[in-house]
Amino acid sequence: MQTPAFWLLLGLGIVGLLLLYHGYRKIKLAALENVSYNRTFSEEGLFAGETMEMVETIRNPGWLPLFRVKLTFYLPAGITVDDKPLTEYTEMTSLFNIPPFGVVTKKHSLRADKRGRFVLGSASIHYFGCEFEFRQSPVFYAYPAAKGLASGGDLPIYRAGNLLASRKYIEDPFFPVGIREYRPGDPMRSINFKASARSFHGGMAQLMCNDYDSSRTVDSMIFLDLNEYPGASVDDKALLETGLAYACYLFCRGAANEGKVGFCANCSPGEDPYVYIPCGRGEEHGLKVLRTMAELDVYAKRDYSMPVILSRYGKDTPTDVDIYLITTGTDEKMNDLLYALKRSGRNVQVIPVEEAL
């Protein structure tokens, strides 16, 4: 049988624990006001279907350890986070234990399941009826998944410098940039016999080839026609997605070859009636084009026909800039305009959307 002193000590202990708990809660509430939090991405943007990291960082500037800090925010549909596909606006909760003067990070795998501009909701900590909100809504872009023609063929516009050629010039024999190992398919004239005589691999002589600079640095202007023509069998969404996927492929190919590339579409994600980005190169220009492609929406207004836009900008396009027109079809007015552009010395390639499906 327990003595009265035992029960007294037990009661005092319980009261002490309750006072300690309530005291910690009050101090924790004050400490949470000074906590800082942010979310960052490992990349500025990614192509649809690719994966990157989302990093949460929370900082405790005080001396009090903060246990079980629950932080919630909302994620948009169309992405997969930590192998969980999100089909609707979804709440996400992260649990942190933060040491005094400590910084805790959590990394999440994030995949873009579709093209678009994604905005994460602001984050908040809820603790005993109090809310601490972090008004930060980070944004990332998912660019179109670039793809070429279903047939796998390349486009029949070939150049050597600024001159048209009857066949592809993969390498420029006038501009060697180094020496590399022989690869199957290399022409015999590219073999460097002096370098081969001095190169051995596994005790055997190794064939070496001259490496040449690319001659296919071609400037191009991409026109995406999002209006349907009579007889077209592609719905609006398929037209937009497949057209953008092919436009993105053309843009990436041109940028990889260090050419200047422009983009035009007869709809717009903003207040402008259509998109027109003149030819350019560089990181800032590339991000502008790719982000515009990411933001285009199937419900965007389409007030201008492509013949009107082509008649305005096509004639202003220099003759050494290739013109690509992605469309569901052409009518008589469009055909007359394309014929006039070709007659003026411009290189025009029409790409049916069905061919990119």
Image (spheres, rainbow, N blue to C red):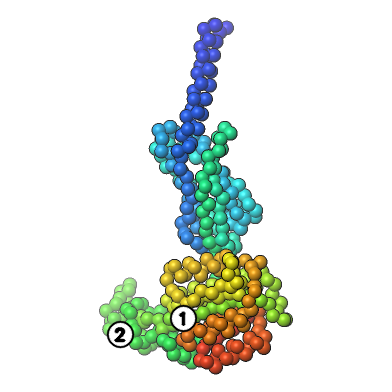
Compared across the picture, whether 195 is left or right of 140 comes to left
User: Could you say where residue 44 lies in the image, as x and y percent from the top left?
Assistant: 47, 60
Residue 144 in sight from this viewpoint: no
Q: Secondary structure at mark 2?
A: helix
> What is the quadrant of the N terminus in the image?
top right
Q: Residues within 10 Å of mark 1 (few under 14, many from 20)?
A: many
Q: In which image quadrant can residue 199 be found?
A: bottom left
Q: In which image quadrant can residue 150 be found?
A: bottom right
User: Could you say where residue 203 lies in the image, as x and y percent from the top left?
Assistant: 30, 74
Compared across the picture, whether 123 is left or right of 160 comes to right
Q: Amino acid at mark 1?
A: Asp
Q: Earlier in the sequence, mark 1 or mark 2?
A: 2
Say which mark, if any, is on residue 103: none
Q: Residue extending furthest right? A: 231
| Number of the front mark, 1 or 2 | 1
Q: Nearer the viewer, residue 116 or 270?
A: 270
Q: Amino acid at mark 2?
A: Phe
Q: Are marks 1 and 2 in contact (CB under 8 Å)?
A: no
Q: Secondary structure at mark 1?
A: strand
**Vertical relation: 127 (above or below) 81:** above
User: Could you say where residue 78 lies in the image, as x and y percent from the top left?
Assistant: 61, 58
Q: Nearer the viewer, residue 169 or 56?
A: 56
Q: Give me the residue at 46% from left, 34% from top.
A: 31
> What is the quadrant of the C terminus in the image?
bottom right
Q: Nearer the viewer, residue 317 or 272?
A: 272
User: Could you say where residue 308 lies in the image, as x and y percent from the top left?
Assistant: 61, 81
**Vertical relation: 248 (above or below) 138:** below
Residue under pointer 2: 193
Say which mark, if any, is on residue 219: 1
Q: Give me the residue at 52% from left, 92% from top.
A: 344
